[in-house]
Amino acid sequence: MIPTSAPGRGVPGRIDWSGPPPDVAVDLHGNGPASHRPLSRLRPARLLAYAHPPARTAGPPWREDEHERDRWCRLLSWYGIPADPRDLRIPAPERPSPAPGAVVIHPGADAAARRWPAARFAAVGAVLRAAGHRIVITAGAGEAGPAHDVARRAGLSESAVLGGDIDPPFPELAALVAQARAVIVGDTGLAHLATAVGTPSVVLFGPVAPRLWGPPPGPLHRALWHPDDEAARPGDAHGNAPDERLLRITVPEVLEALTRLPDPALHPARPTLTGTGG
């Protein structure tokens, strides 16, 4: 993989690669010529991509209203590479959790449109702390300020924050989530990690419907969303202000959703919901 970037989450105009033509290039950005062109210029032996009719690009047809895991597994299957969108789990980390049995709260996301207000995350954390649950606030690189703000408002110590100045090391983060009681998170990467390790979660949605980006159906995960209609993408997922649908989710609603998660004791190698800690 070659790291690339472009302003505003756009497609890079070129890919800096001076080596021989790759055997395979895969377009995971979308179905348009903007992402096809820089890959095609590498002259790969095979380009795996969705069809784009004006350019007559080979590949399966794009479907706008399709869950991401179905979309990319369908692309691979079309090219003869077996991929099952129901196969979501990764092996449980072998290392111990830095906070076994904690409730993990992740207030960050890469766009403000998908960030529930810090004050509300803190209110949830304060209620859980008062009930005797251990809380860990996770944060990606550059999110130290908001994460510590949530911890402070919730009455937690600075040591309750994992990450922030840098991304938490993935093995440590995966162990934390895998051995957590539950995860409370917006529509961002940590929600997918909770799905992958089988940890119960409450996931908060705003600009994009859970049917496109959400966890699989079933009792293990609660997806909260308050749309105006059935539109799958009613808002801008990369907007610079919290989406109005996200703001309709209340603190009591999140707390109630937590009570409806299955008891982690029902799952192998999981702690019970009762416990102490601050």
Image: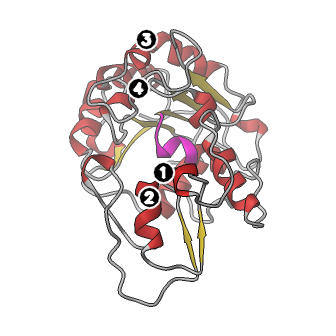
Viewer-side label of 1, 3: 1
Residue at coordinates 59% horizontally, 36% vertically from top-left? 64
Left or right side of 127 for 253? right
Q: Which of marks 2 and 3 precedes in the sequence?
A: 2
The Cα atoms of the two marked residues, 1 and 4, are separated by 43 Å
Q: Are marks 2 and 1 in contact (CB under 8 Å)?
A: yes
- Dot 1 surroundings within 10 Å: few (below 14), some, or many (20 or more)? some
Instruction: Identify the element where label 2 is drawn.
Output: helix
Residue at coordinates 43% horizontally, 64% vertically from top-left? 37
Viewer-side label of 3, 2: 2
Instruction: Identify the element where label 1 is drawn.
Output: loop
Q: Which residue is mark 2?
A: 35
Question: Magenta span has 161?
Answer: no
Identity, as a three-letter code, of the amino acid under mark 1 = Gly
Q: Which residue is mark 4?
A: 125
Which of the labelled discs sits on residue 32, or is there none? 1
Which residues are drawn in magenta? 187-192
Which of the labelled discs sits on residue 248, or is there none? 3
Q: Which of marks 2 and 4 precedes in the sequence?
A: 2
Instruction: Identify the element where label 3 is drawn.
Output: loop
At which x and y percent is residue 240?
Answer: 26, 30
At which x and y percent is residue 123?
Answer: 37, 19
Q: Are marks 1 and 4 in contact (CB under 8 Å)?
A: no
The Cα atoms of the two marked residues, 2 and 1, are separated by 6 Å
